[in-house]
Image: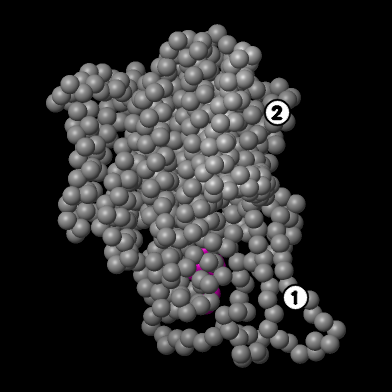
Amino acid sequence: MTDAAVFLILLVLSAGVFIVPARMKYVYTLSVFLASLVITSQWAITAFQYQNPIIISHSSFLKIHLPVMIIDRLSAFFILIINFTMLTGLVYAGGYLKPYQKSKTPVQFSLHFFAYLWLCFSMVMVTLMQSAFNFLVVWELMTVSSFILVMFDAESRPVLKAGINYLVQMHIGFILLLVGFLIAESVTGSLSFSGLEAYFSQKPNLPLFLVFFIGFGIKAGFIPLHTWLPLAHPAAPSHVSGVMSGVMIKMGIYGILRILGFVQDDLLTIGVIILIVSVLSGLYGVMMAIVQHDLKRLLAYHSIENIGIIGIGIGLGVIGLATVNPVLTVLGFTGGILHVLNHSLFKSLLFYNAGSVYSATHTRNLEKLGGLIKTMPYSAFLFLIGALAICGLPPFNGFVSEYLIYLGMFKEISDVGLYEAILLLLSIVGLTIIGGLAIFCFTKAFGIVYLGQSRSEKTEHAVESPKIMIIPQMAIVAVILLIGLGSFMFIGPVAEISLNLFKLDPGSFNVQTFAGDISRLSIIGGIFIVLTIGIFLIRRYVLSKRTIEKGPTWGCGYTAGNERQQYTATSFADNYSELAKPVIGGRKEMEDIGENDYFPKTRKFETSNNDGIQTKYIDRPISKMVGWLKKLAIMQTGQIQHYILYAFVFMLVIFILTWFNII
């Protein structure tokens, strides 16, 4: 029996979660997942050992025809990311879902775990399928299973709205992918991926690539295709948010990379488009993240930002292909692809951490949090590591991939034409601004959530998360540090993925020459952190032998201070909000102070920052469409005679159009 046949059996066994007793559902799900993880990880590890793709399945089992599944290094890379992130998410769910046992039925848990398994299976199969039909089938399975996961708390109206929004937008992307494959099939007569290569060799490349780029871009979350993301991520349970942001949106990146592997012409234009869209996505994502009050919504916008960073690397790589610049090509693609891995780690960590905060306080509102470092020290430490990593600071993993992207731009800015040099310069400025704003945003997030005093009763009695929720986060931190300090072990294999995908000469450029510089910078950063921790421990040891009195923070003689005198999430970003208002919009409402209001009284002050793209290009058109449909509601009279008349008129119109050969 082949591994592919065993994998097929696991797909069937996943339905067993509906049969097993309620107390065994989680263990059963974990067992099926681990079996799948072992098989698919073995495929991935084997694929990294060979230069050419490996055929996993091309036969039948029990008279069931198995689809052709082929794995190469790009597929293997994504499979390993999928498996690790799904594993940490499932372990974390063992603690996160416990409070829901009283409010959810066993059937709801069964459906949730079944959808979780199928999300994993479908993402793995997306990377393996070689025909458009099979690819679109598993792509749709990925959408439906993730939709079910988002709708776990469907009793909530915002969750219901977010889920439907997500499902509709994913199917718009699906239709675009279907159209793209059908266009290629109309020319080549083939629905296989090899047919795409034949199409791009015969026809202009840009139009069809744009169809695929928009289709995959909706899944990835590039602006202006991102509007589902800030709604769906906060609506989903935190382990699902971590998985969706960590790996599911990367399936869009996988699709773009796979299509780029077939593109043969218009490379410079394609690279410029990807680069511009990516820089704008990164800037818009981080600018919107800063003004969010919902912790998970803040993280969702940072997913858009990091998709932008990944896209910057890919765009640079494509421009390098167009200008026959191996240094720019390899550094760009290596940085972008490595950032796929890095983002899957620190973003899943941060979403899990946000779930820990929510489990302890039952709120995600930054204005009601604060002081949690006193009661949740482990969670505070883990969030801090994730924040430093996402900001691209050494010695953490985010620094490695962003450094490669910077390096590609700085090294080659003098070796390209004027047009490309200006574009690279603007990209450097854009990426620098993205990094600076990310530091500002996570300074705010960590400070408001974990430092200071408690801002509400919800945080005063918070307790640390159970070990089953802490251990997966610690495992992620370990990998973050491993990549940050041991970057030389990862840069080479990732560079080989781009060399293999785009059929480049391995001797054209050795990216490992820069791995030593990155490792040295990471080690210096690591030494700094170790010294800081050492000083802290020495201070703690010295103070442990002395009597220390704790009191309130000095209030300049004012003795009635309280938690409301701290910086809030709004006030922390107030100056920024004013400067960025042309881009992020914003609304403030406050009751005016009258001329005769000599004494203070209770007043209401409200601020909000709605996504301008969502408001202008989705909400308003939908509102107009609803208005038009309401006008047509006069046809719904409730009288059957009228409905029969409508049918008669319709048939009469069809008859007339047919009579005159119009249709």
Q: Which residues are magenta?
A: 446-453
Q: How is the image coloured?
A: one colour
The residue singled out by tag 1 in the image is 591
The residue singled out by tag 2 in the image is 421
Question: What is the residue that sits farthest to the front in this orientation?
Answer: 641
Q: Is residue 201 visible?
A: yes
As measured in the structure, the alpha-carbon distance from the residue carrying label 2 to the one carrying label 1 is 51 Å
Numbered label attached to residue 303: none
Q: Residue at the spot x=36%, y=45% of the render?
A: 85
Q: Residue at the spot x=60%, y=50% of the render?
A: 286
Residue closest to the eye, 289 or 23: 23
Q: Amino acid at mark 1?
A: Glu
Q: Residue at the spot x=22%, y=33% of the render?
A: 7
Q: Position of residue 191 (x, y in %)?
A: 42, 17
Q: Residue at the spot x=74%, y=24% of the render?
A: 418
Question: What is the residue that sits farthest to the right in this orientation?
Answer: 595
Counting other residues with Cα less than 10 Å from the Cα at mark 2, is it few (<14), some (14-19), or many (20 or more)? some
- The quarter of the picture where residue 350 lies is bottom left
- The quarter of the picture where residue 485 lies is top left
612 to 174, vertically: above or below: below
Residue closest to the eye, 252 or 403: 252
Q: Position of residue 47 (x, y in %)?
A: 31, 26
Residue closest to the eye, 117 or 77: 117
